[in-house]
Each structure stands twice: as C-alpha cells, then as structure tokens.
C-alpha cells in the first residue's frame, strides 16, 4: 500500500506536506504581521485601498512564496474554501 503525500503549492521552504506547510505559513506570516504593524511601513500607503493589498501580501508571505504580492492568474482553494473565482477577482477586490 502506497502512502499518499498531500499536495502543496510550490513554496520557498521546500515543504511538500500540506499540514506542515500550513503550520509554517501561519507561524511565519504571524511573525511578519507583527513586524509590519510595529514598523511604519503602512504609514504612507492608503488604508482600505486595493493598491495596498499587494504590499501587505508580499510582506506577509515573501519568505514562503515567490508569487507573494502578485495578483493571481489561477483559481485557488484552501481546504474546502474556494477564493473568489478569477473571472470575478478584480470586482471582488
């Protein structure tokens, strides 16, 4: 009997187990969130605007994903949750 390895999104950490990746993603992004809010990095960016989201996403996830801060061009899901479909993404943001 072959053990199935959970699929993961390509990441800078080389993690191939989805549970392990989720744990590291949470740990690292929380550390980055603390740094972000303790710094003045958001001071000159408009609050509540789409233009600020890529900066925040890149800041939080840059150590994990090479695509951090980029607008996605594929449909994605995490577990049973599906993010906004690509065809409606711009309108959803």
Image (tube, rainbow, N blue to C red):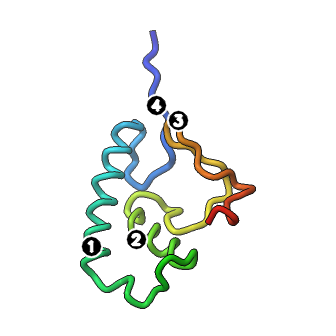
- Within 10 Å of the Cα at label 3, are there few (<14), some (14-19), or many (20+) other Cα atoms? few
Q: Nearer the viewer, residue 56 or 14?
A: 56
Label located before the other in sequence (3 or 2): 2
Which label sits on residue 14?
none
SS for dot 2: helix
**Label 3, on which residue?**
80
**Label 1, on which residue?**
35
Residue sticking out furthest to the top: 1
Q: Image check: 46 left or right of 91?
A: left
How far from the left and from the top, in percent, is residue 17? 40, 36
Label located before the other in sequence (3 or 4): 4
**Could you give the CA–CA distance between mark 3 and mark 4, rounded to whole angstroms?**
14 Å
**Could you give the CA–CA distance between mark 2 and mark 1, rounded to whole angstroms?**
9 Å
**Could you give the CA–CA distance between mark 3 and mark 2, rounded to whole angstroms?**
26 Å
**Could you give the CA–CA distance between mark 1 and mark 3, rounded to whole angstroms?**
30 Å
- Within 10 Å of the Cα at label 2, are there few (<14), some (14-19), or many (20+) other Cα atoms? some
């Amino acid at each position: 009997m072959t053990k199935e390895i959970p699929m993961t999104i390509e990441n800078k950490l080389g993690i191939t187990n989805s549970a392990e990746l989720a744990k590291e993603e949470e740990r690292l992004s929380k550390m980055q969130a603390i740094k972000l809010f303790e710094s003045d990095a958001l001071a000159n960016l408009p609050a509540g605007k789409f233009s600020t989201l890529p900066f925040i996403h890149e800041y939080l996830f840059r150590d994990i994903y090479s695509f951090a801060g980029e607008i996605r061009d594929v449909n994605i899901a995490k577990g049973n949750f599906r993010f906004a479909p690509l065809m409606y993404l711009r309108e959803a943001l």
